[in-house]
Amino acid sequence: NWMPWEYEGQLHVSYTMCPHKVLRCNATDGQCALAHETKLDSCSRDLRGSSQWVAVGNDAMVGVAHVTRHMGGSERHRQNLSIDLRYEHAFLQASATPPFVLRYFSAPFMVPRLYNTDVDFVQFCAGLAIGDNTSELTYGIGDCGAFSVSMPKHMLLHFANVSGPRSGPTS
């Protein structure tokens, strides 16, 4: 669940989101070391990485993370499910320069159900591409299929709060 990106020719990864632990990695020998650690007060320790980070200008990177929710018996019964897990996604924003502060995460969302079975609740966003005017999110459902969804770039930036207010790190 690491979220990679390159900064000044060096591989970095978000190792955890809350706190946001950034490792600097040596691509030759695979060794990684803690480079930065910051914390967004409202962040949940359950938030985990999914996609890679993509720089979008304005000292910002955008990515996608996920939370695994455990569904109680009444919720499972109401939806006629045999599994007790549900993956929810969130768009993230972080600073594109050290210490790579996690600034924002969106409200949770899920992609639409495709199979109308329990596997629809096992989703994982694996990739994010952002072009001049469009963005593409790739994801898998239930380890049964790979899919993608496109949206206008301005919508993705809105969901990731790139032009909105920013929160600073705490110690």
Image: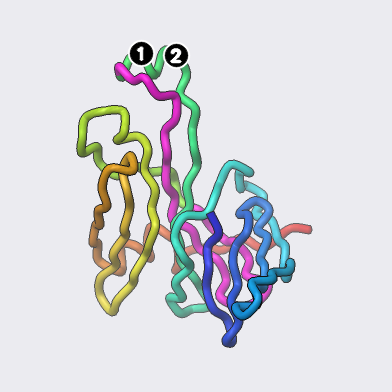
The type of residue carrying mark 1 is His
In front: 136, or 23?
Answer: 23
Q: Which colour scheme is used?
A: rainbow
Point out residue 32 in the picture as x, y percentages from the top left corner: 69, 69
Q: What stretch is highlighted in magenta?
A: 80-105
Please give the residue where the numbered disc 2 appears in the rendered image. Answer: 73
In the image, is 157 to the left or to the right of 32? left
Residue 119 is drawn in which quadrant? top left
Residue 57 is drawn in which quadrant? bottom left
Residue 95 lies within the magenta run: yes
Give the residue displayed 25% in from the left and 53% down from the top.
147
Point out residue 89 in the picture as x, y percentages from the top left corner: 42, 47
The type of residue carrying mark 2 is Gly
> Pointers 1 and 2 in contact (CB under 8 A)?
yes
Point out residue 73 in the picture as x, y percentages from the top left corner: 44, 14
Residue farthest bottom in this picture: 8
* Residue 138 position (above or below residue 61): above
